[in-house]
Amino acid sequence: MKIKTKQLSYEQVMALPRPKPRKPIRPNIILRTIMRIASLWDLLPARFSYTESRMELAQGPCLVLMNHSSFIDLEIAQKVLYPRPVNIVCTSDGFVGFGKELLMRLIGCIPTQKFVTDVSLIGDMRYALEELGDTVLMYPEASYSFDGCATPLPRKLGVLLKKLNVPVVTIITEGAFSRDPLYNCLQKRKVKVSAHVSCLLTKEELKEKSVAEIDQLLDEAFSFDNFRWQQENKIEINESFRADGLHRILYKCAHCGAEGEMHGEGITLTCRHCGKQYELTPFGKLEAKDGETEFSHIPDWYRWERELVRQEILNGSYSLDTDVEIGMLVDYKAIYMVGSGHLTHDASGFRLTGCEGKLEYTQSPTACYGLYSDYYWYEIGDVICFGNRDRLYYCFPKGETPVAKTRFAAEELYKLYKSRVLTLPKGDAAQE
């Protein structure tokens, strides 16, 4: 899937009018039915099925929280929630393109900027629930899982749930990640997909529980490991491309420590620096072809990389310094490619410069708890994205830059500053 891009100068982009806020609308039953039928294109080959629990307690408008593994998630939601009218909180880049904003609004979508504070979103959600009487679907992880485990949820999400004051439903999938993991270059595997739909909290239970108790329940609901699930259920994935792109998440060699030298292709992950090779077995485990297998479980390797990034931050050695191509999102007409620039990231946050000195944007490490980074974004390339409500910057590194490491660093920096392990210089702003 591609996205419309347009070459413009930075000055031209900054002069463009910004979209005016618009209230959500209820998708009509015809569009809902068309979407449900269209979803069968993917759901039938995936042999999709689902189970329910306590759903008799979730009558009327409710908030649905779903884990995020791949594009099939939206199709699953259309299947299990039909015929409820559903407003879907989705990333603003999904609205980009000729006629796409109108279509997305007609099917009930509510745009928001990923990992950007958006107070208006709460108002839009309340409008959909209270005025339209619709159900609202959102993906609290805000981004696809890289390693098949849950990505960090925003703290005090329970505050939002209490404000909305409607039953909370969860949809947790199994097999969706294994069928189409983000690192695997959009290649689908033959894996059965299922989901469990549950009323996590009724309105009465929301009132009784504290924010901390609600957050704990959410953490438990969004606690999963897709590779472990595959192994425990003996799900065999025999595709010859199953390790393609695996270096996007396992970017650091567990044997020699070289970074950016890993390469996943076919069924093999190879370090180009030391030559060590690992086979990704049909049951989702790594096995060294020679010598010790440092990590047979991919999420363990991934967590090891995260801990190393944290240590780099603490000892002052972490930094990202790379040339990038820059895209900007300021409206729903196109992603505007404004030229080349330079991106740095360290303990002081992000700094992006470019467009012949006209662009300079800085963002504090406490601006957000996470980072939107993605692989092969709309078939353009691996991306690091940040910004504010007025504009987003999509940075496409020109070299071998592991965007997963930048995501680790953004998350760990936020936690370290919020826990006061690190301290920002006095007067440092949250953004720009």
Image (cartoon, rainbow, N blue to C red):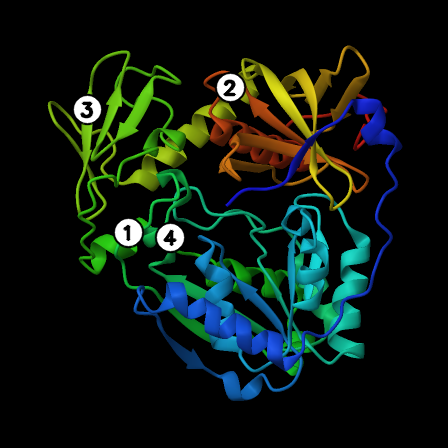
- Relative depth, front residue between 404 and 255: 404
Upstream in sequence: badge 3 or badge 4: 4
Please provide percent x and percent y for residue 325.
62, 21
Question: Disc 3 on helix, strand or loop?
Answer: strand
How far apart marks 1 and 2 lie (CA) works out to 36 Å
Whether residue 337 is visible to the viewer of this picture, yes or no, is: yes
The disc labelled 3 sits on which kind of residue?
Gln
Q: If the image is split into quadrants, where does the C terminus sit?
A: top right
Please provide percent x and percent y for residue 401.
49, 21
Question: Disc 1 on helix, strand or loop?
Answer: loop
Upstream in sequence: badge 1 or badge 4: 4
The disc labelled 4 sits on which kind of residue?
Phe
Total tally of numbered discs in the picture: 4
The disc labelled 1 sits on which kind of residue?
Arg
- Relative depth, front residue between 34 and 285: 34
How far apart marks 2 and 3 lie (CA) works out to 26 Å
Residue at x 67% of width, y 16% of height: 341
- Relative depth, front residue between 425 and 272: 272
| Mark 2 in CB contact with mark 3 (< 8 angstroms) | no
Question: Disc 4 on helix, strand or loop?
Answer: helix
How far apart marks 2 and 4 lie (CA) works out to 30 Å
Whether residue 420 is visible to the viewer of this picture, yes or no, is: no
Comparing labels 1 and 2, the label whose residue is closer to the camera? 1
Seen in the image, is 247 located left or right of residue 109? left
Residue that mark 4 sits on: 177
| Mark 3 in CB contact with mark 1 (< 8 angstroms) | no
Comparing labels 2 and 3, the label whose residue is closer to the camera? 3
**Which numbered marker is on residue 189?**
1
Upstream in sequence: badge 1 or badge 2: 1
User: Which image quadrant for residue 101?
Assistant: bottom right
Q: How crowded is mark 4: few (under 14 residues within 10 Å), some or many (20 or more)?
A: many
Residue that mark 2 sits on: 312
